[in-house]
Image (cartoon, coloured by chain):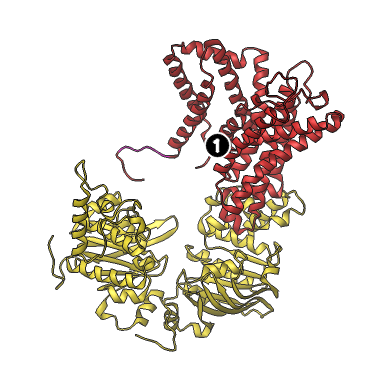
Chain colours: A red, B yellow
Amino acid sequence: MEPPRWGSIFIFPVALGVSLGVSCLLLAAQGKSPALGLEVLWSGAFGAWYTVEDTLLKTVPIFLCSLGVAVTFRMQVWNIGAEGQFALGAVGATWAALTFANLPGALLLPLMFACAAAAGGAWAAVPAWLKLRLGINEIISTLMFNYIGILILEYLVYGPWKDAGSHGFPMTSQFVPAAVVGHFPGTRLHWGVALCVVCAVGLWVLLTRTRPGFELKASGESLRAARYARMPYNTLVLLVMALCGALAGWAGLLEASAVTGRLQPSLMVGYGFTAIVVAWLARLSPARIALFSFFLAALRVGAENLQLELGVPAAFGGIMEGLILLTVLAGQFFNGYRIRPGGAHR
Amino acid sequence: MTVQPATATPPPLVRLEGIGKSFGPVHANRDITLDIHAGRVLALLGENGAGKSTLMSMLSGVFPPDSGTILLDGAPVRFQSPREAIDAGIGMVYQHFMLVGRMTVAQNVLLGQDRGLFVRPRDMERRVGELAGRYGLDIDPAAPVAGLSMGERQRVEILKLLYRDSRVLIFDEPTAVLTPTEAGQLFAALRRMTGLGKAIVFISHKLEEVLDVADTVAILRQGRIVDTVARQAVTSRHELARRMVGREVLLEIERAEAPLGGAVLELEGLSGHGLDGLDLTLRRGEIVAVVGVAGNGQKALVDVVTGLAAPAGGEVRLQGKPWAEFFRDPPWNGAVAHIPEDRLGVGTCPELDLVDNVLLTTRKGFAPGLFLDKKSALGATRAIIRRFHVAAHGPEVRARQLSGGNLQKLVLGREFFRKPRLIVAEQPSQGLDVAATEEVWHRLLNARMQAGVLLVTGDLNEALQLADRVAVMFRGRFMAVLDAAQARDLEKIGLLMAGVDAGAPRA
């Protein structure tokens, strides 16, 4: 299996059309007007400045996670554990925020970023180590680590970290102001947007300008050639996994600190899974990852609006996301093979 | 089923006429004409890469020939798939069996053959048992395939073809997976099949078994049939070995003498990974060729010498340092360069451009710190393209866009850029045309001025043209290490390659 090659850009609009068509059928099957549904979907994502803000806010975690996932995919390491790494990042940052609440912001925020990166990175490094030392399939282990990570988060907010004044709700106490990532004046957009730009540029430099970046690219192209050229494959796998974990961890930090201001189970809405779809669609280019992150974030916001306005089930957004990935993959399949009449072989 | 007498010379069941097949620039088969008779075993003898499997893949419908005709019962046929070939009565027993492990022998044999909706296991097993009995194939039709030995699985594959009334059965190196006892049983079954009028094609590079089983031997070399002889006409094994290896010199090259320097590679009793006590000293200024039929330990030897596998037994020293010390952190230059056999799959990354492919093994030279100096790498790539006459539109083309010869020149240029003291070259001219071969050979001869060259090759002419000494490898051992002059005795080399010690020849 290979992510789509970039000659096939036109596949995406076609696939989008097909999946929207199927979504319309689903709406009609529920007795809703498809035309109204599409209109509500659009206005939910782009209808007003505050909906665009919503979309951008959701773009940030998806973008950070898929940046990391794309790098691991580039090395043919099928890491689908961004969701768990996101959870551990949020946990790491929250630990710092709760433990050192009396530090000034200039110290506390960097400490939170370090803890989020360490926790998320470690959570990704364990499956990498299991793969390298014991040959355990990373698809299974990273998937399982997602659920363990989410359960750790839930244990903490239901147990030791639960806010005494929360009336029994599973959540930590509100972060002190020094632990909150600030906002652009006059908007709801936080500084995480800037962090996305920094990470994208940094990653681009790493991949295109440095020796480890080159080794990573070559190892992803041909494992046999990498072995022949004595590339440190094991180190590279650990590196990309830890990198992905750190990026997903920062996404978790931003959600906890800038969006909800505390750690709570509702942080886990599947950004880490959406990131896999984005990484697969966009391959490695940070610009394309940004584009697809924004697009899938818009879909999420729009589907929420659909749920509110038309009473469509909450799962509808996930269904559309899955449909888009499926139709793109199917389009890729038919792009790779040529259908010839007569049934001749090859 | 009609039983044809194997006397006189009835018209052939299958005739291949002027068959040719190319894969890109490689001619796998050229102008092959061959008759396959009912009731006879035809052996296709040749080294790996001689084109045996390609030829039989065309007969069994895996892919069509580029040129020539396949005549079945005198009428031309053109198979579009293995299915069509099987329906026409031609089937192949591959080295890798295609069986369903959880099903029984009988179920595997009848898979896809049942006409009715319901199957009666007892009835299926009885029919398969009868068929096996008729051909002397010892097998329990009710046994699940998963529990069978390789020999028994092979019998299931044979039964599948017999059940479909195949008249021509092709065996691709069938003894490779068998124990000696099982091989004996297979040969008995082959005779039983020819006795019942089947035509057998037996692909092998092992002299011994070909002489045991064949009625006719066709020798393939570099895609051509060089000889077809009846078994009775074969008087000595020497003769077959020599024909298989070949004697005509395709290309001659002038070689100047190079002064001998210090030892760059020393092997003392190197063992493990299928190797058996290899001794060799390679000095700067000389080329030592390792010849032999592929699969006799060459790969393990190369893996050890290039640092991919640690020696399990014996001593290995490179430039005077023990193996472990040398490969702890080998410098990118002034050490070992490797020209691998698979240039596109191992030596390069097909989808990357030429600069990236040059960087593959030289990257440490362009990144003193963290950052890669891409501009210098581009300059070096341009220089390699110019100095090694790589015909490429520019450094930005992808490796897969280069022809085999140009890709090999790029790999050579890159590896020589590392200023190696030891060069390991595997099949460096395989698949190249005469001009490219000549250029590659000149480069290797010139490299002796700075390095010692270990040339691993299946091409005896290449070894004789380039090498100062020739080591003949068989089953992980050096049968002999001969001087260039001694190595000119092709008959002797042929025997050594077949594992026959020249001191005690048997015929």
Q: Nearer the viewer, residue A112 or A152?
A: A152
Q: Nearer the viewer, residue A244 or A289?
A: A244
Q: Nearer the viewer, residue B401 or B482?
A: B482
- Image coordinates of residue B179 in percent, x first then y, are 37, 70
Q: Nearer the viewer, residue B323 or B264?
A: B323
| Res B501 seen here | yes
Q: Residue at x 65, y 12 (%)?
A: A48
- Image coordinates of residue B328 in percent, x first then y, are 70, 64
Residue A199: quarter of image:
top right
Q: Is residue A327 magenta?
A: no
| Res B319 seen here | no
Quarter of the image with the N terminus of chain B is bottom left
Q: Is residue B197 above or below residue B241?
A: above
> Where does label 1 land, which residue?
A6
- Image coordinates of residue B151 in percent, x first then y, are 33, 64
Q: What is the tally of numbered marks visible in this picture?
A: 1
Q: Is residue A72 above or below residue B69?
A: above
- Image coordinates of residue B480 in percent, x first then y, are 51, 82
Range shown magenta: A337-341
Majority secondary structure in the magenta region: loop
Q: Residue at x 36, y 60 (%)?
A: B54
Q: Is residue A5 above or below residue A174?
A: below
At label 1, counting other C-alpha atoms closer than 10 Å, the crowd grade (few under 14, some 14-19, many 20 or more) is few
Q: Is residue B259 above or below residue B105?
A: below
Quarter of the image with the C terminus of chain B is bottom left
Name the chain under label 1: A
> Tag 1: residue type?
Trp
Q: Residue at x 78, y 20 (%)?
A: A184
Q: Secondary structure at mark 1?
A: helix
Residue reaching furthest to the bottom: B503
**Horizontal side of residue B15 vs A250, given as left or right:** left
